[in-house]
Image (cartoon, rainbow, N blue to C red):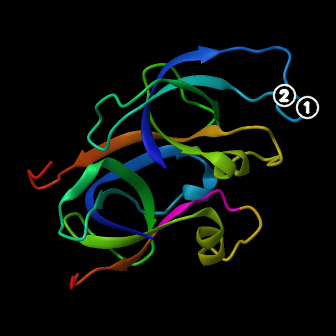
Amino acid sequence: MILGRVCGTVVATIEHPFYDGKKQLIVRACLPDGSFDGEKYVIAVDLVGAGVGETVLVEDEGNSARQMMGNLKNAPIRSVIVGIVDQVALG
Amino acid sequence: MKLGRVIGTMVATVKYKGMEGLKLLIVRPLTADGREDGEPFVATDASAQASSGDLVTWEASREAALLHENWFVPVDHAVVGIVDQHAYDDGGKR
């Protein structure tokens, strides 16, 4: 899983039917101290109601994402926001 | 998924079985805020309507193949949708 911060939204009218009605957020990867991890980012489907500016947990793996969609065989999805992070404690 | 810009189209008459009718696009990957990020690649078009100049979302690896009706195809990059609105705000932290 990836720690990240929601930095934006993407809206598409013409898209693969699977993504119709699914909120897609731009999440930039973060280091535990909260700084961005280079240019790494992902556009993920939001399952928890996250918003811009929030720190989130992103699952970036196809099989896990398909399980969460309840369609193990062929949902064309890989990245899903699965949690909103309140606090990161190191050490 | 990631952001990309369609910079061209490609036509191949002879394609592997199962890829008939798939449209091919040349896509340049973009960063989260829309700057160019790396070399272009060829992707199939799962949105069916993307064309040159469009801002799009794309998916790679197995999920790219799964975007197609016949999902057992040798495809490793595919365009998912055409972006109408792209909002970006990193809080000035870069």
Q: Residue tagged by mark 2? A: B20
Q: Which stretch did the figure color magenta? A: A75-80
Q: Position of residue B71 (x, y in %)?
A: 79, 49
Instruction: Determine the secondary structure under disc 2.
Output: loop
Judging depth in this view, the residue of A29 and A24 nearest the camera is: A29
| Amino acid type, callout 2 | Glu
Residue drawn 49% across the image and 19% down it: B52
Q: Position of residue A2 (x, y in %)?
A: 40, 67
| Amino acid type, callout 1 | Lys
Q: What is the tally of numbered marks visible in this picture?
A: 2
Chain on which label 2 sits: B
- In the image, taking residue B92 as reference, residue B90 lies left or right, namely right
Assess disc 2: are there few (<14), some (14-19) or many (≥20) residues with their C-alpha within 10 Å of its C-alpha: few
Res. B8 mark: none
Q: Position of residue B64 (x, y in %)?
A: 65, 46
Type of secondary structure dominating the magenta stretch: loop
Judging depth in this view, the residue of B84 and B13 nearest the camera is: B13
Residue drawn 31% across the image and 44% down it: B32
Chain on which label 1 sits: B
The question of residue A78 being in magenta is answered with yes
**Farthest residue in the left direction?**
B92
The question of residue A59 being in magenta is answered with no
Res. B17 mark: 1
Quarter of the image with the C terminus of chain A in it:
bottom left
Residue drawn 45% across the image and 70% down it: A1
**Farthest residue in the right direction?**
B17
Q: Are marks 2 and 1 in contact (CB under 8 Å)?
A: yes
Q: Position of residue A66 (x, y in %)?
A: 65, 69
